[in-house]
Image: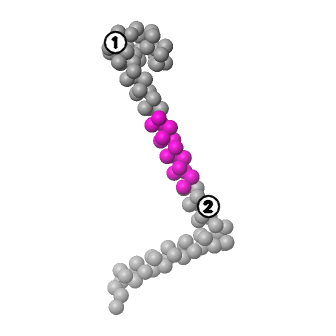
C-alpha cells in the first residue's frame, strides 16, 4: 500500500520525466540540449576567467616579492621599478 507521500513523490518523478521528454522532443526543438550546452559553455568560460585572474594575481605577487627582496639588497627604487614594472609608489609601500 502506498502512502500519500509516496504517491506524491511518484507523481513528481513522472512530471519531471514528462518535462524532460517534452524538452527533448522535436516539439521544443531540442531546447533542453541547447540549454545544457549553454550552461556548460558558461561554466567553462567562468573557469577560464578564474584561471586568468589567478595568473594575473600570481604575476603581481611575484613582482612584489622580487621588489621586496631587491629592496632588502639595497637596490634603488627606480631600478626596481624599471625591472618589475611596478609603480614607484607601490614599491615604497613594500618596505
Q: In which quadrant is the N terminus drawn? A: bottom left
Residue marked by disc 1: 73
Nearest the eye: 1 or 93: 93
Disc 1 and disc 2 in contact, CB within 8 angstroms: no
Crowd band around label 2 with a 10 angstrom C-alpha radius: few (<14), some (14–19), many (20+): few
Residue 93 is at least partly visible in this image: no
Q: Where is residue 42 in the image (x, y as percent from the top left)?
A: 55, 51
Q: In which quadrant is the C terminus drawn? A: top left
Farthest-out residue, bottom: 1
Q: In this view, does 66 lie above or below 22?
A: above
Q: Position of residue 19 (x, y in %)?
A: 54, 72
Crowd band around label 1 with a 10 angstrom C-alpha radius: few (<14), some (14–19), many (20+): few
Position of 71 with respect to 21 (left or right) is left
Nearest the eye: 13 or 93: 93
Does 77 lie within the magenta span? no
Q: In which quarter of the image is residue 7?
A: bottom left
Q: In which quarter of the image is residue 67?
A: top left
Residue at image point 45% right, 37% down: 54
Residue 34 is at least partly visible in this image: yes
Residue at image point 44% right, 32% down: 57
Q: Position of residue 61 (x, y in %)?
A: 40, 27
Nearest the eye: 92 or 83: 83
Element at badge 1? loop
Q: Could you tell me how far apart the alpha carbons at marks 1 and 2 are, in whole angstroms?
A: 59 Å
Count of marks placed on residues: 2
Residue marked by disc 2: 34
Residue at image point 50% right, 73% down: 16
* Mark 1 or mark 2: whose residue is earlier in sequence: 2
Q: From which residue to which does the magenta span run?
A: 40-55
Q: In this view, does 50 lie above or below 66?
A: below
Element at badge 2? helix
Q: In this view, does 10 lie above or below 67?
A: below
Amino acid at each position: 500500500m502506498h502512502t500519500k507521500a509516496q504517491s506524491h513523490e511518484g507523481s513528481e518523478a513522472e512530471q519531471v520525466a514528462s518535462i524532460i521528454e517534452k524538452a527533448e522532443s522535436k516539439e521544443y526543438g531540442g531546447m533542453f540540449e541547447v540549454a545544457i550546452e549553454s550552461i556548460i559553455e558558461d561554466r567553462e568560460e567562468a573557469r577560464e576567467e578564474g584561471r586568468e585572474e589567478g595568473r594575473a594575481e600570481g604575476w603581481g605577487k611575484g613582482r612584489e616579492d622580487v621588489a621586496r627582496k631587491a629592496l632588502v639588497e639595497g637596490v634603488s627604487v627606480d631600478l626596481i621599478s624599471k625591472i618589475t614594472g611596478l609603480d614607484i609608489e607601490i614599491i615604497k609601500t613594500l618596505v
